[in-house]
Amino acid sequence: MEYSAVQIAGWVNGEIEGDASVTIFGPSKIEDAIEGTITFLGNKKYTEYIYNTSASIVLVEKAFVAEKSINPTLIRVDNVYASLALLMEKFNSSITIHKGISNLASIASGVIIGEDASIDDFVIVKPNVKIGNNAKIFGHVFIGDGVEIGDNVVLYPGVKIYHNCMVGNNCIIHANAVIGSDGFGFARNEAGAFEKIPQTGNVILEDYVEIGSNTVIDRASIGSTIIKKGAKLDNLIQVAHNVTVGNHTVIAAQTGISGSTQIGDGCMIGGQAGLAGHIKIADGTLIQAQSGVASSTEKGAKLYGSPAIEYQNYLKSYAYFKRLPEIIQQLREIQTKVDILTQKPQ
């Protein structure tokens, strides 16, 4: 299907600059766009491409000022990325799913399933489960005893949700994520062997949470591991037992969060970060990729390094670290001169 610049501007509340009748059939990247596509300029690093892109339409910020002529039609918006997210929904080609309940699914008796829910082939649903309206559950998903799933939830292929966990409304869980596996709880006995501590809690995902592929969220030993409203977790993340992740916090891939750590609202955590257990990450904390955080933070902290320190201090320290051999040599030369100046005459 094709869409005109006028239609697109209407969806994103944008202002058209150029040919309003031009049409596009899909999106593209600005650096290798082709005619008939729409692209965007959201990062100044890519500004050079807007002057020779073959795209037919480009989304830009209203404040964008062109330094030379531009061939595509521009649609100026308040926020390029927010507009792009809205626009991508129009081009999103979902994988197919069985409408209604597949005969190849295994559904325990007494399971409550909401209106317009779709349950695909080879899904397993255990007793006492509740599934909300308009849920989409793709093939090979496992839903354990007593799980509650809200409205408009999407569970992609291979998701596993252990017993008694709760998934709120409008959540998305991507392929092969595991929700509610046992936390890493063991006690050493008198013989020196480790004995398992039963993990009796659950996991609660509040509304509008998104969990990436192959991410694992452990159930609490007692109580709940909680991912709060609007939080977004990338792929390959480990969330240990009794962790709390705050509202609208985002966490990038390969991050590991140790047990009982509390992460505040609106935090941003880069990829491969590691957080020690039993610490509190304050609201609005920014943690750079590959940082190791071993202690609690204050509100709005910006951390970098391992162990992580304040962001600007890290950058200054690293600038010196790169020159460390040179600095050491200079210090040795200064020490030699001092020794000569302070040497007592014979």
Image: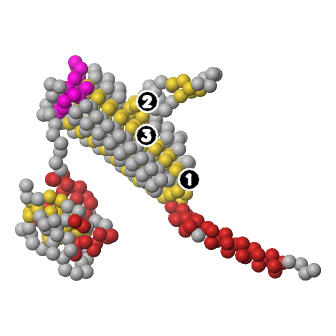
State the separation of the CA atoms marked 2 and 3.
11 Å
Label 2: which secondary element = loop
Relative vertical location of residue 50 with respect to residue 88 in this rendering, above or below? below
Contact (CB < 8 A) between labels 2 and 1? no
Q: Which residue is mark 1?
A: 307
Color style of the picture: secondary structure
For label 2, the crowd category at 10 Å Cα-Cα, with few meaning under 14, some 14 to 19 and many 20 or more, is many
Write down the residue under mark 3.
239
Labels 1 and 3: the sequence-earlier one: 3
- Distance between mark 2 and mark 1 Cα atoms: 28 Å
In the image: residue 325, left or right of residue 243: right
Q: x, y (%) of residue 64?
A: 26, 73
Q: Please report whichever mark, 2 or 3, sits nearer to the chain's N-terminal start.
A: 2
Residue 120, image x, y percentages: 18, 32
Q: Is residue 171 visible?
A: no
Amino acid type at circle 2 is: Asp
Q: Considering depth in this image, is 25 or 268 the residue closer to the camera?
A: 25
User: Residue 244, position in %: x, y?
Assistant: 43, 40
Please tell me whether mark 3 sits on a helix, a strand or a loop.
Answer: strand
Residue 220: image quadrant is top left
In which quadrant is the N terminus drawn? Answer: bottom left
Instruction: Characterize the local packing of mark 3: few (<14), some (14-19) or many (20 or more) Cα atoms within 10 angstroms.
Output: many
> Can the viewer see residue 111?
yes
Q: Which mark is residue 286?
A: none
The residue under label 2 is: 182
Most prominent secondary structure in the magenta stretch?
A: loop
CA–CA distance between discs 1 and 3? 20 Å
The residue stretch that appears in magenta: 105-124
